[in-house]
Image (cartoon, grey):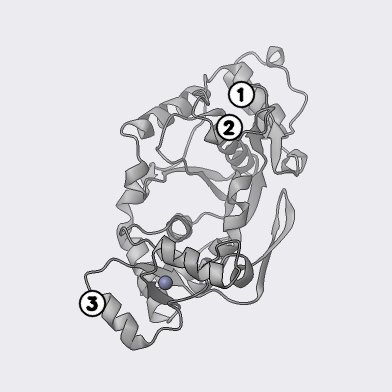
Amino acid sequence: MKTHIEKSHFNQATYRGRFAPSPSGELHFGSLLAAMASYADARHCKGHWLLRIDDIDQARVVAGSDRHILTTLEQCGFQWDESVSYQSQCLIQYQEALEELKQAKLTYPCSCSRKQIKAACATLTNKEGIYPGTCRNQSTQFSATIKNSDKSHAIRIKVPAHDISFIDRIQHNYSQNLSRDVGDFIIYRRDNVFSYQLSVVVDDFHSGISHIVRGYDLLDSTPKQIYLQQQLAYPLPHYAHIPLAVTKENLKLSKLSQAKKVDCSLQTLVLAANFLGQKHLNHKDFDNKDDFWRYLVTHWDINKVPKMENQVIMV
Ligand SMILES: [Zn+2]
């Protein structure tokens, strides 16, 4: 099988990083931070840096925003390797991975509505609303019926009872018990969309990504992704999660509708680098953006990135 040949040929010694924005709007300061951290780390390690447009959820796509994001990155001075990939063009790969998980009997169909899950959780005094596995223990007969019926259903993956731990390059030890903290999670949505968790893992594998640098908001998705990587026999990438930019009022920049489009000035780039702990840079010390990038790539130190969830930024 083709995928198995690729799996054994994966070369972990080669650094391959990526930035994967969703085309749901303009590039704002929060995404600039993830782009900068992943880029500086890849280049500092003499690695490749790839761009991927995470457009799996077509309902959230804002037409034309992929072009805007690419133009903004270019104007900021980012240079990416290889052609830009789009999740919407990789559906066959997701389908193959889903089949592999199904074959391994790790999945089951779930037709529970949100309301039913809420009701089931209430009887179990499960305040977190963690899926209680209602459909996991249904008979195979039930699975066959649900599979063949027209009724839409999601596909969930059975999660293990043990802890999944990893060492984040910035946040250090992180551990989660998927069974207790998450529950069997959805890998294929009832509206016929492959879940973020599955698509991101399959994409990173097929692009040979060895290092992932992204925002803290995805830290608690990492154990789910590691679990999927383990089940699909993919190599595990190295992870680093940077703090999120928040306003004085503790509002996440990424969630603010008024979060402004990045202006690509040298001042903004220096502000981002300082936020990432590469202090105490001053835009007056650089002749131009090229000069800034040369400096940042040479002096980049991931150990200086603050080990915290949120950091205040003035907007
Ligand atoms: Zn269910």
What residue is drawn where x is 72% and y is 42%?
302
> Of helix, strand and loop, which one carries label 2?
helix
Q: Residue at x 44, y 61 (%)?
A: 198
- Name the residue that disc number 1 marks: 269
Q: Seen in the image, is 63 located left or right of residue 130?
A: left
Quarter of the image for residue 189 reads bottom left
Residue 266, image x and y in percent? 60, 17
**What's the CA distance linking mark 3 and mark 1?**
54 Å
Q: Nearer the viewer, mark 1 or mark 2?
A: 2
Amino acid, disc 1: Leu
Name the residue at 44% across, 29% down: 26
Where in the figure is residue 258, as x and y percent of width and height? 51, 24
* Residue position for label 2: 253
Q: Quadrant of the N terminus?
A: bottom left
Whole-percent x, y for residue 280 in the image: 78, 24
Nearest to the eye among marks 3 and 1: give it: 3
Q: Which residue is mark 3?
A: 148
Earlier residue among tags 3 and 2? 3
Q: Looking at the picture, tell me which residue is in the foreground, 113 or 152.
A: 113
**Residue 152 vertical position relative to residue 257 in the rendered view, above or below:** below
Choose top left, top right, bottom left or bottom right for residue 161.
bottom right
Mark 1 or 2, nearer chain start: 2
